[in-house]
């Protein structure tokens, strides 16, 4: 069982499966959403994820057609992204995990729109 929470601790969740491959997305939306050079995410089955506290704090925003980002309305921590066309899977923001997922970063995506002040030197695969 993996557990996670937002910065203020109001939103808490559990995941009853292992997470998928962790990727660093460098697209401009993920950079702005995370306030950093990239967003670290992993795909998980929706059925394995459940909020255990803070449902009343959750907010959702449609960042582009069919893509919904969920976050804590009190502290702003991004929790996950849902795709309307793929409701069986969620994109978890792994920085919100409180427990060790047992995996490491696997690749970088959307590097063509990465922040100009970032150099990727870790040797991981890069795309887009």
Image (cartoon, rainbow, N blue to C red):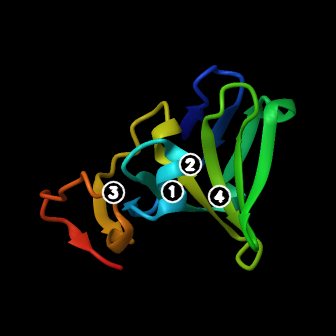
Q: What element carries label 1?
A: helix
Residue named by callout 2: 33
Whether residue 18 can be seen here:
no
Q: At x 31% / y 78%, what residue is drawn?
A: 127
Compared with 102, 46 (above or below) is below
Query: Regarding mark 4 in the picture, which secondary structure is present there?
Result: strand
Could you tell me which secondary element the residue under label 3 belongs to? loop
- Contact (CB < 8 A) between labels 2 and 1? yes
- Could you say which is closer to the camera, residue 61 or residue 52? 61
Q: Do the residues labelled 1 and 4 touch (CB within 8 Å)?
A: no
**Earlier sequence position, callout 1 versus callout 4:** 1
Report which residue position mark 1 lands on. 30
Residue 56, compared with residue 92, is above or below; it is above
Q: In this view, does 79 lie above or below 45?
A: above
Q: Name the residue under label 3.
A: 115
- Pointer 1 local density, CA inside 10 Å: few below 14, some 14–19, many at least 20: some
């Amino acid at each position: 069982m993996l557990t996670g929470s937002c910065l203020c601790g109001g939103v808490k969740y559990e995941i009853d499966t292992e997470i998928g491959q962790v990727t660093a997305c460098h697209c401009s939306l993920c950079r702005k959403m995370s306030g950093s050079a990239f967003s670290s995410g992993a795909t998980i089955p929706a059925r394995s994820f459940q909020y255990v506290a803070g449902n009343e704090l959750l907010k959702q925003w449609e960042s582009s057609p069919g893509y919904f980002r969920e976050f804590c309305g009190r502290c702003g921590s991004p929790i996950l992204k849902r795709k309307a066309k793929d409701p069986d899977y969620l994109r978890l923001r792994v920085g919100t995990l409180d427990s060790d997922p047992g995996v490491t970063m696997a690749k970088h995506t959307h590097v063509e729109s990465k922040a100009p002040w970032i150099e990727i030197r870790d040797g991981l695969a890069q795309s887009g």
